[in-house]
Image (tube, rainbow, N blue to C red):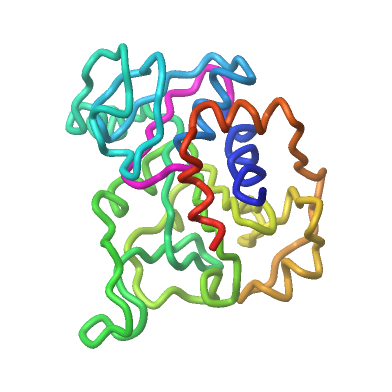
C-alpha cells in the first residue's frame, strides 16, 4: 500500500532522543511516530493534540484529536506543548499542507484569491507560529503533483524561509529535504514505483537528485501498522 510506505518514510526520519508532536487529523504522522517508537525502538516521546504525553498505546480513530484514541497517558495540554515549542524543546512537528513551494512556504488557508477563493481550506491553526520554531518540520502530502508542490503558494499560512531548522517533505512519490545552503529541495528517497524523472515532472519547481535509497516495506512492518489501524482508516488517504 502506498500510504504504508509514506508512514515508514516518516518513521525513519524521526530520531532517538526527540520529542515529537502530532497535530489534528494526522493519521500518517501519528502512525509514523508510533512506528518509530514501538517498531524501530527509537527512544522518543510522543505528544499530541489529544493532550496526551507519550501514551502507551493508540487506537486509530477518524480524528487524532479524539481523547479516547490513546490510553495510559499523563495529560499535557496543547498550551503547554506550544510553550515547549517556543522554548525550543519540541524537536519534530508535522504539517499536512495543501500547497508547499520552492521556499518552504506552506498553504493551509485557501486555493485561489484569498477574498474569493476557489477552495477554502481548514486553516493553519498554529502553523505560522510552529513552522519556524520547531527543530524539524515534516510536511506530508499524499497527492504529489504540480498543484500541491508549486513554485509559489496561493497564500502563505506559514514559512520556514527565515529559520535555520530542518524541513522535510514526505509524499507518495518521494522524500525531499530543503537545503538552506543551496536554497532548493533535494530528493533523498524514492519508492519502488517512483523515479527522479517522475518526481520532477510532477513538481512545480526544480528539484535536485540527491537520492540515497528507496523505501520498501516488509510484511512485519505492514502487520504492525495493521495492528494500530485495525479499521484501515489510513487507506482513505490513497484515493
Q: In this view, does 177 lie above or below 182?
A: above
Residue at left offset 32%, top offset 78%: 119
- x%, y% of residue 217? 74, 37
Taking the magenta stretch, the answer to whether it contains residue 173 is no
Image point (38%, 48%), residue name: 131
Query: Magenta region: which residues?
Result: 15-28
- The quarter in which the C terminus is drawn is bottom right
- The one nearer the camera, 90 or 78, is 78
19 drawn magenta: yes
Q: Residue at x 66, y 51 (%)?
A: 2
The image quadrant of residue 155 is bottom left
For residue 216, side relative to residue 163 (left or right): right
Q: Where is residue 106 in the image (x, y as percent from the top left)?
A: 42, 62
List x then y, in percent, for residue 84. 28, 27
Side of 95 where 117 appears, left or right = left
Q: How many labels does the image show?
A: 0
Residue lying at the far front of the rendered structure: 231
Q: Where 157 falls versus 35 (above or below)?
A: below
Q: Position of residue 87 (x, y in %)?
A: 29, 29
**Which corner quadrant of the image does residue 76 belong to?**
top left
Q: Quadrant of residue 9?
A: top right
Q: Which residue is drawn at 48% across and 54% down?
A: 236
> Is 196 displayed left or right of 73 in the figure?
right
Amino acid at each position: 500500500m502506498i500510504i504504508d510506505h509514506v508512514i515508514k518514510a516518516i518513521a525513519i526520519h524521526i530520531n532517538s532522543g526527540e520529542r515529537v508532536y502530532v497535530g489534528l487529523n494526522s493519521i500518517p504522522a501519528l502512525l509514523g511516530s508510533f512506528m518509530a517508537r514501538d517498531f524501530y525502538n527509537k527512544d522518543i516521546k510522543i505528544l499530541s493534540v489529544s493532550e496526551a504525553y507519550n501514551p502507551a498505546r493508540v487506537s486509530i480513530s477518524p480524528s487524532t484529536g479524539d481523547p479516547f484514541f490513546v490510553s495510559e497517558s499523563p495529560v499535557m495540554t496543547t498550551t503547554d506543548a506550544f510553550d515547549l515549542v517556543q522554548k525550543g524543546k519540541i524537536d519534530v512537528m508535522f504539517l499536512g499542507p495543501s500547497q508547499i513551494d520552492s521556499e518552504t512556504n506552506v498553504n493551509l488557508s485557501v486555493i485561489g484569491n484569498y477574498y474569493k477563493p476557489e477552495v477554502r481550506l481548514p486553516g493553519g491553526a498554529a502553523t505560522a507560529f510552529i513552522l519556524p520554531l520547531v527543530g524539524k518540520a515534516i510536511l506530508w502530502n499524499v497527492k504529489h503533483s504540480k498543484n500541491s508542490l508549486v513554485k509559489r503558494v496561493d497564500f502563505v499560512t506559514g514559512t520556514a524561509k527565515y529559520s535555520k531548522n530542518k524541513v522535510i517533505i514526505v509524499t507518495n512519490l518521494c522524500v525531499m529535504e530543503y537545503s538552506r545552503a543551496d536554497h532548493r529541495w533535494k530528493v533523498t528517497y524514492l519508492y519502488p514505483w517512483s523515479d527522479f524523472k517522475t518526481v520532477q515532472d510532477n513538481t512545480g519547481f526544480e528539484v535536485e537528485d540527491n537520492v540515497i535509497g528507496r523505501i520498501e516495506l516488509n510484511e512485519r512492518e505492514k502487520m504492525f501498522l495493521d495492528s494500530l489501524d485495525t479499521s484501515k482508516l489510513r487507506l482513505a488517504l490513497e484515493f
